[in-house]
Image (tube, coloured by chain):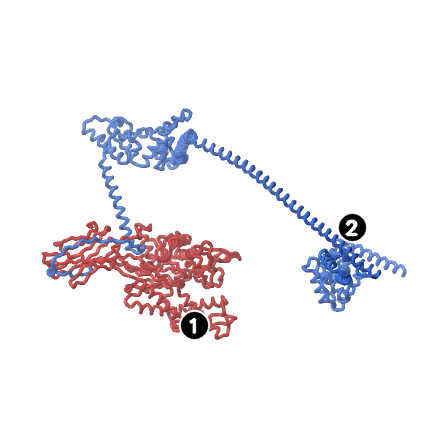
Amino acid sequence: MTLSLINIPSADDYSAREIREWAPGTTEVVVEPVGKWFETYNNRRAKSSLSFASVKSTTSEEEDNEEDIELCPEDDDYVFNRDPAEWKKQDHYKILGLSRLRYKATDKHIKLAYKKKVLQHHPDKRKARGIPTEKADADFSCITKAYEILGNPIKRRSYDSVDPAFDDSVPNSKTVTKETFYETYSPVFERNARWSIRKKVPLIGDDSTPYEDVCEFYNFWFEFNSWREFSYLDEEDVDKGENRDERRWIEKQNKSARKEKRKEEMMRIRSLVESAYNLDPRVLKQKEEEKQKKLAIKQARKEEVRKRIEEENRKKREEEERLAKIKEEEEKKVKAEEDRLKKEREAIRNKTKKERKALRNMAKNFDYFTTEESQRVHNMAEVDKLAELLELTKLQELNTALSSKKEKDLAAAEFFKFSKELNARLDEEKRKQIEDSQKSADYSSESKSNRNWSPEDCTALVKAVNLFPAGTNKRWEVVAQYVNEHGKGKFNAKEVLAKAKSMQKLDPNQKKEVNARAYENFDKTVKDVNSKPGGGISQRYETVAEQQIAERGTNPSPWSASEQKLLEHALKTYPASTPNRWDAIASTIPNRSKKDCIQRCKELAEMVRAKKAATSKS
Amino acid sequence: MATTFGVYVGNSSACVACYKDGKADIIADANGDRSMSTAVIFTEGEQVVGNAAKQSRNFKNKVLHAKKAFGLSEADLSKVDDEFGAKLTYFNEPTFKVFLNDKEKRFTPAQVLSVVFKKLRETAQSYSGLDSAPEAVICTPYNFSKHERDLMSDAAKNGGFKVLRLINEPSAALLAYDLGQDNSHESQSCLVIRHGGQTTTFTLIRIRGGVYSIIDELDENFGSDLVTQLLADHMQRDFEKRFRANIGDSIKPRAKLRNEAEQVKHTLSTLQSATCSVDSLWDGMDFQSSLTRSRLEGLCSDYVGKFVTLLKDFLQKNKINNIDSVVLSGGGCRMPLLRNKLQSMFENSQILSSINVEEATALGAAKQSAIVICSKKPELKEEDTIVTCTNYNLYVKDKTGEKIRIVEQLTPLPIRRQFQCNIDDASSAVFSFVSEEDGIEKDLGDMVIKDMEDTCSKLTMVVHVEMDSTINIHLSSADGSFAENFSFDPRDN
């Protein structure tokens, strides 16, 4: 990398100036996390924070190194006169003088203790100190063995697991009372906490511990995960095995033994936790509270239901009352309305009566507006008619008109005007009535009349009816259209319907005639009639036949050869003695009803008889 | 070292690059395509991705430009709507409606992108022979929000990638050219021009001490698909005139024309003329024609004009008149007319386009992936991207009175700079310092050295700016006979 070159001026030209105070500032910038320089920068930042921590840790290490441990003096004699072959039975911690620390001893403690013990008990050292030592070698090997076990984390763990100093006991739940619960169980749990794989073990706490913590405590202990294992107690040493099979066998034995012990251990913890849980005053209290709460909730719910029902009943009652009231009011109103109407009617009637009487009197006074006898009779009738038929207002009008006129002639004129008016109205009404009646008569006669149904129309109608079975959308309009297209006349749906109905009512002869004519027509137009009458019947036609059977009970189409065959066969299979013989026969032949079959049979019998007679004659 | 990957998924195209044996390279997929289309077709039981999907005429089920739909509000949906693709609707978030078995199905843009990522992952795996999820750095646009970035990251994870880091697309493009990576003294201002099919972005990036920071960005809904459309429209007019046909709005022939127009556009970027032929375009009639580049340039002069205006406005807004490097990316930058225009606009800057414009971003991401995988601290927190920088320029005056910059503004701390100083007189020297903050210059005074040994005609000046912004200036002669320290300390005040 080439450095930038700066030519610096010499100081000769300058009088020296002091550098002014200036504080360089910083600012924060958001940068892109890309590129190697960013990474370098970021690493540097991370390192600077790391280095601080590492400095701390190194200092603590140094402290450890300087630390000295005090070995238990009471362990001093333990090492003497031990049999190194019995190493499994020796207390390794005691050998190293760590019986106070035991499992709490760190690796460093062990190392230091070992060093000290070695310095103390090495055969050469002992000799140098002039202590008579017969078994110095044995003692030393005991120390070595102890370090071998405790210095190796795995071996140490297996030794710790079966530490003879550990109290496996579980307090007897029967002797524990509420008061002694914490003091009894607290040390037991603390003791057993050392087996936990999880380092942070919750404590049992006391009465003031929140219930969540209590729950957590029991959850932890119910799912207690122990590192305790019992390989140290293996009966036999795997390495003792002479061959592979034996070694495997030993391994298996050991394994099962360990498993058994581990199970026992788990049971022990379990029973401890269970007994504690069952006795824990906090848990009992909580349970009681919950029970109370549940009960309270239940009670409350019951109460609520009761209240709700009451409320509903009350509402119902109120509603009923309200409805009854409304009904009553309505009835009252209706009654009042009726009364009012009645009164009005009464009033009108009375008024009318009065007016009528007035009219009659007036007419009488005016001597019925005439002098001639015959005219008088006529006029009297007119007066009556007017009195009876005029409405109240008109009557009043007439009366006022008559009463205002003093002279007889004028009154007469008025009277005649009104009577004329009335007569004209009556005439008009009569005419209308007649017209209406005529109209209806016309209509009925028209609908009754066949108008002009030509035979072609009829055949077209029959065809159409068969073609569009019941259920067709807008059947009769479609039929009418068909008839209009194929026949001569023009008909609407109503007419067609009427005709069809009337035709249904017609005697079968006429129907046959129509059919025959249709067939002839068909014959005329279509030269090549199907040579195979059986197979020639189209699906469509069959459905029509079915339709006809359904509608009329018979199928008017001629019997085909195949049908004939079927009939003969059926007659043979169902002898005369068969119950419902004709039903059975009809069911074997498609598109033929019972009635058809009977008829055909009769026809056939007739033909046979005729033939026989003919042959006998000849 | 493990193979790592960089992935770029854009609105129209996607690309994956790998970093292996100290080299970044684009991976071609099974068809030999180095970049693929992001079009996805959802059909019964399968999903077609890439160029095959783009060509298809299954318009109802074709999802185009899914990335653009990210984080769109309901009102902006029309920005993405493409008549040749599935309908985009709003359903809590933007979703594409497709029809499977005549049943409507909805896909979010993230779901669509995860299909694209899946395809890229397959390409990456088949190239590297990896069975596990490929570790990749994913590019996202600068204007993506945190939520959109998370969506993108999830889409990549669903697609089968292990996401090492998300980086911004413009930064990745710069990294592809190793800008500022050679030495940490370099400082530059760069402009990244991305001109894709759908959008155009201009990004101003400052490089200080090898670290990038984005100053400003303009994202415009303006892409080179418009050129394709112009070309297609021209071809349609041509056809209609010749055959007296009326294609009108019929979608199929127009889609055919558009595909062909795209081909022609690509050809005209390299050649002077191109032929286009579409079989059975309309009513059984074939269309054959040839187009020259000048014709195309005539068609899209307005378009280029708009592009240039946008760019000029952007530069004016940021009051930038000196840009050191211009990096081109995105398929639209292939256009020769556009390149010429840019060349004339940035006469004094170096224009970097040696890397295939569509691939630059992915390549940069691949390079970044190698950096991340080697990093001791690959996990990145948000506060890690906030860096303490100087807020001043520090100059020293040279013989002619000219100011030589020794510390530059906005350089991340700590800084170490080394200078060689010539001293004519060889016995005395004056270092006069000047600081500049927000354009205000401040004479800081002189530092005078006298009575030096004669041998020191050259001094080495080392400038350290510590994290707490203390400036230590250390002067020494090569033989060690002279050494002097001086510092500016913020604690003095």
- Residue drawn at x 37%, y 61% is B219
Q: Which chain does the residue under circle 2 lie in?
A: A
Confirm or deny contact between disc 1 and disc 2 (CB under 8 A): no
Q: Position of residue A485 (x, y in %)?
A: 71, 67
Q: Residues within 10 Å of mark 1 (few under 14, many from 20)?
A: some
Quadrant where the C terminus of chain A lies?
bottom right
Where does the image place residue A401, in percent across and percent down from the top left? 73, 59
Is B301 situated above or below A119? below
How many angstroms separate mark 1 from mark 2 (CA)? Answer: 90 Å
Secondary element at tag 2: helix
Q: The red chain is which one?
A: B
Q: What residue type is labelled 2?
A: Arg
Chain drawn blue in the picture = A
For this rendering, which residue is in front, B28 or A409?
Answer: A409
Residue A33 in which image quadrant: bottom left
Side (left or right) of A451 relative to B303: right
Relative side of A368 to B14, left or right: right
**Residue B275, numbered circle:** 1
Q: Mark 2 points at which residue?
A: A581
- In the image, A410: left or right of B264? right
Q: How crowded is mark 2: few (under 14 residues within 10 Å), some or many (20 or more)?
A: some
Q: Residue at x 34, y 56 (%)?
A: B167
Q: Can residue A435 be seen in this view?
A: no
